[in-house]
Structure formats: structure tokens, C-alpha cells
Amino acid sequence: AQSVTQLDSHVSVSEGTPVLLRCNYSSSYSPSLFWYVQHPNKGLQLLLKYTSAATLVKGINGFEAEFKKSETSFHLTKPSAHMSDAAEYFCVVSDLTRGGSYIPTFGRGTSLIVHP
Amino acid sequence: EAGVTQSPTHLIKTRGQQVTLRCSPISGHTSVYWYQQALGLGLQFLLWYDEGEERNRGNFPPRFSGRQFPNYSSELNVNALELEDSALYLCASSLRGLAGVETQYFGPGTRLLVL
């Protein structure tokens, strides 16, 4: 069975400082991993995804994430936060189910707060 | 290119009533997914349709059902509404039926309030 844990429900940073949103997962096979962002009153948007290629994945808006199999982690980082980064971030793991199909499991979300 | 659209945007119902939510995928996408985003619970997978067939469903009671039409649009039906069904219902579409590798594109959601 697959699961995903976002270790922080809220992360607060100052504009211009680095961002770290933590995600740990468990899966039975070789998972695909995603980060999505949800701005207030808007749908989810894909930031980046890992599908067994390079372990360091670069996404949109300067975000990147590193897949670390030994640590079962897929943390999201950005060198310098911008006010527009304030949003809810979801880590997603997708793995083969018993029925042979992939079903994504979403983390509970991390709310990123950016102070001026 | 138009994104995923959902209707209505907001809905208020009372306990016991029935509701139908609608989703139109991005042109060319054959897979549609439904999620429930209840306050404090994150996104919960509801249903997955691909090529007109239900491929998988999450851990929800049978009163949650849906279908996918030949043009790949989809409906989510919820019967016998309960207070805890109040949530944002999100629809997503993807190019192929492999949720594991294909990017899902999300609509803005339908916010349902059950009184």
C-alpha cells in the first residue's frame, strides 16, 4: 500500500529566503511522485514530477525536488521565496495498485506563508 | 487551449437530496478523475474514468457514482446527501489512463455545502 506524509502543515518564510517543504512516502514498487500547488480559490497546478528518470527534478517557478530512495523522501525546495509562492502544496505518490492500475495518493498539504 | 471546466461552481443542498456535478476535460484527454477535498482531510480519490468506463474507485460508499460520456465529459452523482459531504469536488483529466505517469490537469472545483 502506498502513503505519503507531508511533515509540516504550515511553513512560514520571509520573502527572498529559501523554501523547504518536506514529503516522505511509502510504496511497494517504483512510484511516480508529484508536487502540485493550489492557490486560493483555484484548482491544482503541477509543479513537477518524478517518473524514474533523473533524481533531481526541476519544475516551474524555480522549484525543484530530489528523489531520495534510501530516505523515501521527495522534498520540494526553492532558493528564494516570492510573495506569489504563498499557497497550499501537495505531495502525491502514485503506484501500482493490486488491480494493476495507478491511483494517486495525496498528502494532507503544506500551507506556505511568505512574509514581506 | 481551454482547461478543465466544472459546473456549477457552488451548490447548496439539504440532507437527503441528490446532486450532480459536471466536468469537461481538456480536448484530447480521455481520462477523468474525481476527488473530494474536505476541510482538513486533503484530497481523497473518488473515481477514475477512462474511455467511458469506470477504472477504479476510492473508499467511498456506493451513493457516490458517476459516468463518462462518449465525448469524455463526466458526471459525479451523490445520492442521499449527508452533512459530511460538504467539500470541494475537484475534477482532473489526463491524456492517457496511466495516472501514475501522466500529469493530471485540474479544474477549479465545485464547492458543495450540505445543510
Image (cartoon, coloured by chain):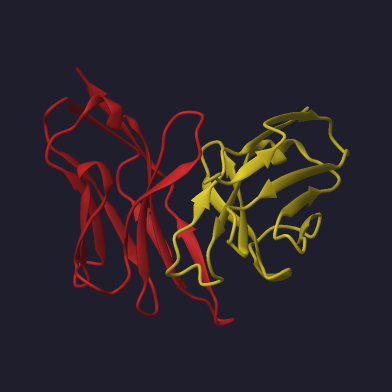
Chain colours: A red, B yellow
**Position of the C terminus of chain B by quadrant:** top right
* Residue drawn 86% across the image and 42% down it: B18
- Residue B73: x and y in percent read 71, 55
Is residue A93 shown left or right of residue B21? left
In which quarter of the view is residue B30 placed? bottom right
Q: Is residue B12 left or right of residue B51?
A: right
Q: Position of residue B32 (x, y in %)?
A: 62, 59
- Determine the image quadrant of residue A18: top left
Count of labels in the image: 0
Task: Place residue B29 in its image quadrant.
Answer: bottom right
Q: Tell me: residue B93, above or below residue A84.
A: below
Judging depth in this view, the residue of B1 and B110 nearest the camera is: B1
Residue at 26% over, 67% down: A72
Residue A91: percent from left, percent from top? 37, 53
From the viewer's perspective, is residue A95 above or below residue B33? below
Q: Position of residue B99 (x, y in %)?
A: 50, 67
Q: Residue furthest front?
A: B1
Q: Is residue B107 left or right of residue B53?
A: left
